[in-house]
Amino acid sequence: MIVTTKQLFEIAYGKYAVGAYNINNMEQCMGLFRGCVDSKAPFIIQLSKGARDYTHKLMLEGIIRAAEQIFPDAIYAVHLDHGDEKTCIDCINSGFYSSVMIDASSESFDENVRITKLVTDLAHAKGIAVEAELGQLGGVEEHVNVDEANAKLTNPDDVKRFVSATGCDALACAIGTSHGAFKFTGSQGLHFDVLAEIQKRVPGFPLVMHGSSSVPQEEVARINAAGGNLKGAKGVDDNQFKRAAELGVTKINIDTDGRLVWCRVHREMFRDKPEVFDLRPPGKIFMAEYAKFIAAKNVKLGSAGQIDAIRALLAK
Ligand code: G3H
Ligand code: 13P
Ligand code: ZN
């Protein structure tokens, strides 16, 4: 069942976070649905601009609609990840997306407000929710290239003004994470102090944590042992997700970890079975391994086991 991110956030706020997972193809889609149904967790499917351009935006829509028939118990929302103005408008008009993210975080505060409000007004006219971003994560994003060194945490003093001026429905905050597999050096970590201040300014308002892959060290070790070179890769401690959820983080974005599963499965297959050239053997293993990864991640998010309660609440 497709629901809106708004519905999921109202139910989850302060209690647990909903996993927002990026997909690009059928194998990721199957693993995601399987893992969420097995762990009885609601979820958000995120489609980035890059994912929409990988084959065709309609291909993704077709794959997701097919998955819904294969997994009728799934409860999920479809969301555009890191959209620009043009892509947001395309998704708003498509009738398929429950919400869009407008990422104008690299712009000045005033320009970010202007672009976000424009998109929000268009989205709300069609009943679609909007996630915006304030502050800048390190690492590389879709159309924004921010030097890690210049990453700027969200200023809690700006948050209330931004939310009221734009009318957005959820806010991605920079609290120390970055995209990709190399998030932290030394003892850096999440800035819970900043998060707590943000929540005080906008109590009850859904916050979003991007760059939340945990980059499991055993995964990195297996990839490197099979010919990869990911030395120094490091992610977010997923034992901290529940604390973040209590402080208002209702959506947690995970993409890189799924790519690591894909990379490990394929590297090991080609190392151990050099005679294999069929795409299906590694594809089958990937779908099963990704489903296992997703189910375990949903436990860390606190979303595992919530699906029956959500169904009951939505039926009221
Ligand atoms: O935050 C970015 C997401 O990980 C999506 O990555 O733009 O390469 O699809 P992508
Ligand atoms: P990761 O790179 O940590 O998986 O973050 C993904 C993300 O924030 C997508 O918007
Ligand atoms: Zn992101």
Image (cartoon, helix red, strand yellow):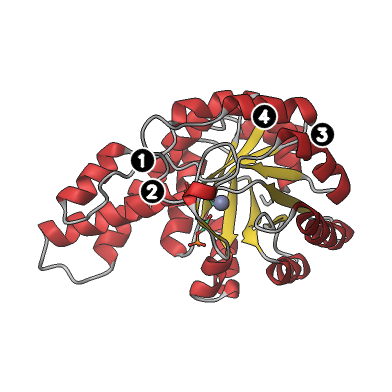
Q: Amino acid at mark 3?
A: Lys
- Can you tell me whether the CB of the residue at mark 2 lies under 8 Å from the nearest atom of ligand 2? yes
Whole-percent x and y of residue 297? 45, 36
| Point 73% across, 44% down: residue | 170
Front label number (4 vs 1): 1
Left or right: 215 in relation to 93: left
Front-most of residues 205 and 69? 205
- Count of residue discs: 4
Q: Are marks 3 and 1 in contact (CB under 8 Å)?
A: no
Whole-percent x and y of residue 69? 57, 58
Q: Are marks 2 and 3 in contact (CB under 8 Å)?
A: no
Q: Which residue is mark 1?
A: 234
Label 1 crowding class (10 Å Cα cut-off): few <14, some 14-19, many 20+?
Answer: many
Kindly state the secondary structure of the residue where label 3 is placed.
loop
Front label number (4 vs 2): 2
Q: CA distance from mark 4 to mark 1?
A: 35 Å
Q: Are marks 4 and 1 in contact (CB under 8 Å)?
A: no
| Point 68% across, 52% down: residue | 2
Q: CA distance from mark 4 to mark 2?
A: 34 Å
Kindly state the secondary structure of the residue where label 4 is placed.
helix
Q: Sequence order check: which comes first, mark 4 or mark 2?
A: 2
Q: Which residue is mark 2?
A: 181
The answer to whether residue 117 is visible is yes
Q: Amino acid at mark 1?
A: Lys
Q: Sequence order check: which comes first, mark 3 or mark 4?
A: 4
Q: Which residue is mark 3?
A: 316
Q: Sequence order check: which comes first, mark 4 or mark 1?
A: 1
